[in-house]
Image (spheres, helix red, strand yellow):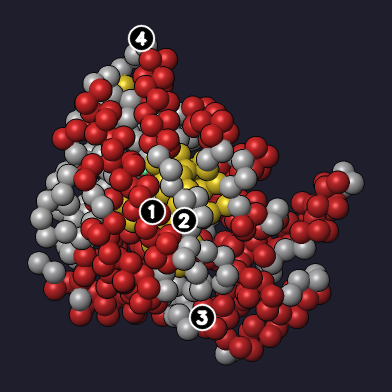
Amino acid sequence: MSIKAAYELAKERYAELGIDTDKAIAETEQIPLSIHCWQGDDVRGFENPEGELSGGIQTTGNYPGRARSIDELRADFNKMASLTPGKKKRISLHAIYLDSPTKVERNEIEPKHFASWVDWAKQYGYGIDFNPTCFSHPKSASGFTLSDADKGVRDFWIEHCIACRKIGEYFGKELNDRCIQNIWIPDGFKDIPVDRFAARARLKDSLDKVMAVEIDKRYDVESVESKLFGIGAESCTIGSHEFYLGYAVANNMLLTLDSGHFHPTEVISDKISSVLTFLPEMLLHVSRPVRWDSDHVVIFDDELRAIASEIIRNGFEDRVFIGLDYFDASINRIAAWTIGTRSMQKALLYAKLEPTAELKKFEFEGDYTSRLTMLETLKSMPFGAVWDMYCEKSGVPVGAAVLKEVKEYEKNVTSKRA
Ligand code: RNT
Ligand code: ZN
């Protein structure tokens, strides 16, 4: 049966529940998605592509074909984008993805080092988000950056973050857009500390200095990302959830929730509504933790659907910025990028295809029987036919056709990278 014929039947079935599938597709494609650049090259960047990834995060696997240059990374990103529906794609860059023929210290990076990214983003209609890179560097070797006991180290990272804010403002001005700047630091103790308070006081002081610089909020805003623990920082993470929730509320900043940064049975889908009770906006780092913050490729699982539902049911599309953050080097990286990005799109579309008002009414009236019945019924609706139509309309491969494209690109492009 053709995609169109299957869709027409699905459309009828959903209409019986009062759901307009055309509208769901039209709304889903307008939701911005901030896609991380670092799936393409295992978080290496171009400052020192041979350097080791440090800071308690790890990629595993050595599938051939990693992007080794800016041109390769851009080509790969474009390939992924051509396989993914959605009209508002953004690239989330890290500071180490600068374009400079000579070495530039991180506290000396400037907008000019990112000018070619702006040209490229303009050409393809992408937005740009940004991240200071406070890891994989000799000055983070102690395991600390903005909260380091050494003032010299702190000052270096303060300067780096300020430089990044200026670059974010530059992106925003150039693209007539707002850059979301995510600050994550690896700082933490491997073993039980005796003075957590001092380290957190230092972090607060450093952040205050970073944020004291006047930056036009129309073009760049900051978000702070908490974490539970990292490899080598198991006993205490300075930028914990409580720390940053407090910091964001006190300073009217955004807060970033990463799916992998909480205890294993905690889920970020449950936290969005709490955060947005007190903050106007927030950022998500959608990832898939398997037993730890393993950054597996995002798939269409229960938690991804729950995250999407929280956003859609509450109409939070303008308050929750959806960013992706995972990195798998054990499979074809273009496939990894594409699967995760498509999964996010799929979950948003799935969330759009429910009779939310009716479900909320059941709940309000205490009719949990009807709520559960309806939620379970939705799972066997012909969602696949609507998803396929969304892909078809967007001009991206439907279903397994994605694999063919990925394999072809592998054959012609990535497998040729020695
Ligand atoms: C690390 C954080 C952070 C990084 C990226 C590369 O645990 O999740 O967001 O993954 O900045
Ligand atoms: Zn993250």
Q: From the image, state whether disc 2 or disc 3 is nearer to you.
A: 2
**Distance from label 3 to label 1 (Cα)?**
30 Å
* Residue for point 44% across, 80% down: 397
Report the front residue among 393 and 131. Answer: 131
Instruction: Name the residue furthest right.
Output: 365
Image location (x, y in percent) of residue 224: 45, 39
Disc on the earlier residue, 2 or 3? 2
Instruction: Name the residue furthest front.
Output: 214
Density class for disc 2 (Cα within 10 Å; few <14, some 14-19, many ≥20) is many
Which quadrant of the render holds ligand 1?
Answer: top left
Q: Above or below — where is 350 with respect to 389?
A: above
**Distance from label 4 to label 2 (Cα)?**
41 Å
Q: From the image, state whether disc 1 or disc 4 is nearer to you.
A: 1
**Distance from label 1 to label 2 (Cα)?**
7 Å
* Residue for point 72% across, 63% down: 354
Image location (x, y in percent) of residue 330: 26, 56
Density class for disc 1 (Cα within 10 Å; few <14, some 14-19, many ≥20) is many
Q: Confirm or reject: label 2 Cβ below 8 Å from ligand 1.
A: no
From the image, tell me which residue sits under label 3.
Answer: 394
From the image, tell me which residue sits under label 1.
Answer: 168
Contact (CB < 8 A) between labels 3 and 1? no
Q: Above or below — where is 346 with respect to 152?
A: below
Mark 3 is on which residue type?
Ser
Mark 2 is on which residue type?
Tyr
From the image, tell me which residue sits under label 4.
Answer: 194
**Distance from label 2 to label 3 (Cα)?**
29 Å
